[in-house]
Image (cartoon, rainbow, N blue to C red):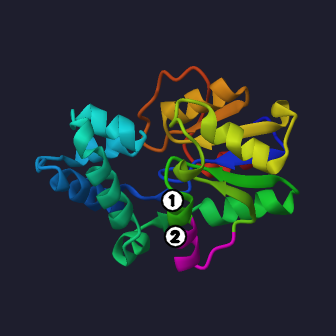
Amino acid sequence: MTQFSVYLFDFDGTLFDTKISLRKVYRDSFAAVGIFDITDEECAEFMHHSLLQTMQMRNIEPKDYQTFSDVCIRSLDEPETVAANIPFPETIEVLSKLRKQGKRLAAASGNTSKHIHLVLDHHQLDFGFETVVGSDMFRHGKPAPDCVLTCLEKMSVDDKSSVVYVGDSLNDVGAARAAGVAAVLVDRENEYPDFDGTRISSLEELLC
């Protein structure tokens, strides 16, 4: 695989298995606006979208956006939710090896920067990220390029050819391409067999 000098990572579903923890978050948030029939399959889809996109997918009234968002943020940062986020088996080793190779690392996520730091602190992990960019730091969610471009700005990276964004959804790929950087799709469950770009089943393949 092509090697880069700057590796940007999505968080949920890419570095950490957050699927189970997010089910509670989404159900709490939808319940707050009177929607109680959220399925596991919907939760798995919501995690690839911004909060606004998620609300629009279930036709929430704009007047209820703030309530939904407030409950979502509160539920995300509850200790039980934070503790339920688990790094994928290869995450720690792969990021450690990339650091030893002199790669620059950062996180660019649709989640909040506070939540990411809470999860890392809970697990006592230091991935050596130069910066953590969350949804509280940019305006437009993926597939808009904001999260990637904000991250590059904070890292003072001008050469986009040296950068790859690694994520687990087509929205991550769209954000990378819109930002003008390379994209790698982590497809652990073979959800995107017809994807027309670089696709891996494990982060370990970044080292090959």
Quadrant containing the N terminus in the rendered view:
top right
Dot in front, 2 or 1: 2
Cα–Cα span, label 2 and label 1: 9 Å
Residue where numbered disc 2 is placed:
119
Judge from the rendering whether residue 20 lies leftward or rightward of residue 87; answer left or right: left
Quadrant in the picture for residue 55? top left
Where's residue 193, x and y in %?
A: 46, 26
Mark 2 touching mark 1, by CB under 8 A? yes
Residue closest to the eye, 176 or 89:
176
Name which residue lies at 51% across and 56% down: 112
Please state the horizontal and vertical placement of residue 65, each as a whole percent of the image: 29, 44
**Residue 122, percent across and down?**
52, 78
Badge 2 marks a residue whose secondary structure is helix
Which segment did they paint magenta?
Answer: 117-126
Number of numbered discs present?
2
Which residue appears at 69% of the width and 72% of the height?
126
Q: Which badge, 2 or 1, comes first in the chain's sequence?
A: 1
Q: Residue at x 57, y 42 (%)?
A: 167
Q: Nearer the viewer, residue 113 or 90?
A: 113
Disc on res. 69: none
Q: Where 159 sits versus 157, above or below? A: above
Say which mark, if any, is on residue 16: 1
Is disc 1 placed on a helix, strand or loop? strand
Give yes or no for residue 122 being in the magenta stretch. Answer: yes
Outermost front residue: 63
Instruction: Please give the name of the residue rendered at 60% of the width and 60% of the height, measured from the top-left corner.
Output: 90
Q: Dot 2 surroundings within 10 Å: few (below 14), some, or many (20 or more)?
A: many
Q: Is residue 52 left or right of residue 180?
A: left
Q: Amino acid at mark 1?
A: Phe
